[in-house]
Image: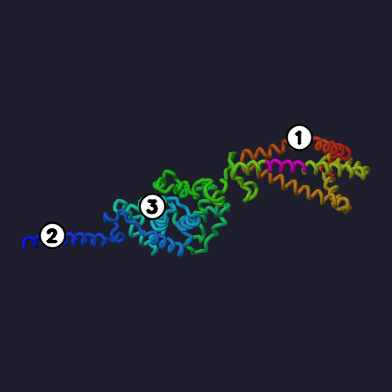
Amino acid sequence: MLQSLVPSKASAFLAVLLALTAGSQVQAQAVNCLVTPSDPSCVSFVLPPATVTADIEGLCTQMPYMPGCSLYSSCKAASKTDQWCTPFSVLADICSVDMPMMKDCKNYIALCGSAANQTTASRPSVCTSAPMIEAFPTTKNASALVIDICTEMDMAGCERCPKPAPGAYAADCDTLGTYAILCKAMPDMSQCATWKSMCSASSATASSLSFQSSEYCAAGVGSPEMNPPAMRMYFHLGFSDYVLFEKWVPRNQGQYVGTWFALFFLTLVFQTISTYRTCLESRWAEEQAAENDDTSKSDSSERLTSFGGDGKHRSSIFMHWIQLWRQPWSLKEVKQNVIRALLTFVETTLGYALMLVTMTFNVPLFFAVIAGLTIGSVVFSRQRSAGVARGDSNSSATGCAGCG
């Protein structure tokens, strides 16, 4: 009898123990971390990846121009694994400050709260391990900053974000990428204070997300489009500078050396055309003087008189010009003027182009032009001397080479 009671008591004890265990499991399962995220059991809770992705996709389908969506598209396109590309961190960039009231932000807000009411001590650890980027611009702020910069100065990159229609919430474009491009080109603009804070290495999220090393902040990271040359209005060194055209931007040593020699030889071409035009003008003047020797001498005498008299004789120069303009051009003069116009056009274009190169303030490129002018003056020294000698002899015959 006693032997039969012992097993029954043991069975009862085990039944009670199992019941208590089951009850505690039911109680644990009953904790909904989206409802009570401050519960101690929710410290290690994370949203399922599929839920996070679905929330981001839903948000970016509705408003693809949000900065967080631009970030998400960049991360997704390049399959980036950076900390700032963590899906939950991207969700935080959208929901924490920018759009906390949107429907697809409800899971994030329930778990971590908005930036205004977050109490990290009582939230799941994922809220602090994958936070939003500090000083990350809101949709409206990023759009306003881009529009303000591009209204003030039509820079390269502004074409990416056309001005929104009146009444629109924000510009329908990649405002984050455009804002980064503009501020990387001219970081000292007042509108770039938010960009500097976002990209600061001393920010609260810098160590956990390393966003300061992203293509949106760091020079030389990402595509060439994301790395426009900085506009520096002072003498400087470095590879990256616009050279006359938007696409002519040397970005490595080989391209830079090639650019240097291209500019050097372009300057020699300028010197060649300039010298050739000078010599050609001298030869034409010499031929004209030979053909009209008597007329040239009388005109010269008249000009010398006009220069030596009182003010009333000065008008004879202009009268002589008018007489020359009234004379019909010969076929020879037409050919000469066509050649003269073409050479002047090319020479002037090259001259101003080389001036613009020096205005990049890039020291080696500046001296590429100076070296070309210096070497060219030596290479064409004899030709120039011969041309000047012809011009001088012609001037002595006509009295004023530049007047008539």
The answer to if 262 sits in the magenta stretch is: yes
Q: CA distance from mark 3 to mark 1?
A: 65 Å
Residue at position x 46%, y 58% from top? 69
Percent position (x, y) of residue 312?
Answer: 83, 43
Report how far apart the C-alphas of labels 1 and 2 lie in the structure.
Answer: 113 Å
Q: Nearer the viewer, residue 304 or 335?
A: 335
Of pointers 1 and 2, the one earlier in the residue sequence? 2
The residue carrying mark 2 is: 10
Would you say the residues marked 1 and 2 are in contact, meaning their CB atoms lie under 8 Å apart?
no
Within-10-Å neighbours for mark 1: few <14, some 14–19, many 20+:
few
Residues at marks 3 and 2, CA–CA distance in whole angstroms:
52 Å
User: Which residue is disc 3 drawn over?
Assistant: 131
Image-quadrant location for residue 309: top right
Chain part drawn in magenta: 261-272
Instruction: Tell me the SS state at disc 2.
Output: helix
**Amino acid under disc 1:** Val
Q: Judge the density around disc 3: few (<14), some (14-19), many (≥20) Cα neighbours within 10 Å.
A: many
Residue placed under numbered mark 1 in the picture = 378
